[in-house]
Amino acid sequence: MSEDRFGKYLVTGTLGRGAMGVVYLGHDPDIDRPVAVKVVHAHLLDGEHGRAFLARFQQEATAAARCLHRNIITVFDYGVSQNNIPYIV
């Protein structure tokens, strides 16, 4: 793991890994609750396709945030870490 926090969210473990990123178990200290933090692999943001990949990740965050259904997770936050790694909470 390259960071132990993304924004205000403290990373406490790893929930899963895939070809496009990692989902970490995190903690929101402001309201004392567990969260999942989805992070893009940094190497995918480099090169000629990096901007397009970042745009797709931002669209995913926006689309998921608009979905309100009991079987779809709620998006609480989107941000970019100090190391320029985008994340969705």
Image (cartoon, rainbow, N blue to C red):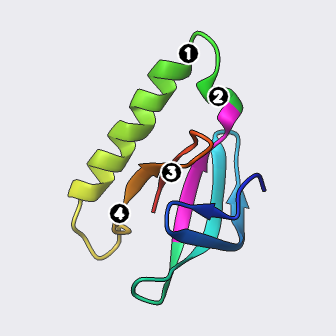
Give the alpha-carbon distance from disc 1 to disc 4, as whole Å. 25 Å
Give the residue number, with chain letter if any, for mark 3: 87
Position of residue 6 measured from the top left corner of the image (x, y, whole percent)? 56, 59
Give the residue number, with chain letter if any, for mark 4: 75
Which span is picked out in magenta? 36-42
Give the residue number, with chain letter if any, for mark 1: 49
Question: Would residue 8 appear left or right of 61 to someone viewing this image?
Answer: right
Give the alpha-carbon distance from disc 3 to disc 4, as whole Å. 11 Å
Q: Residue at x 56, y 15 (%)?
A: 49
Label whose residue precedes the other's in the sequence (2 or 3): 2
Image: 44 above or below 65? above
Q: Which residue is drawn at 60% across and 27% down?
A: 45
Give the alpha-carbon distance from disc 2 to disc 3, as whole Å. 13 Å
What is the three-letter code of the residue carrying label 1?
Answer: His
Give the alpha-carbon distance from disc 2 to disc 1, as whole Å. 8 Å
Q: Is the C-beta separation of discs 2 and 4 under 8 Å? A: no
Q: In which quarter of the image is the N terminus?
A: bottom right
Helix, strand or loop at label 1? It is loop
Q: Is the C-beta separation of discs 2 and 1 under 8 Å? A: yes
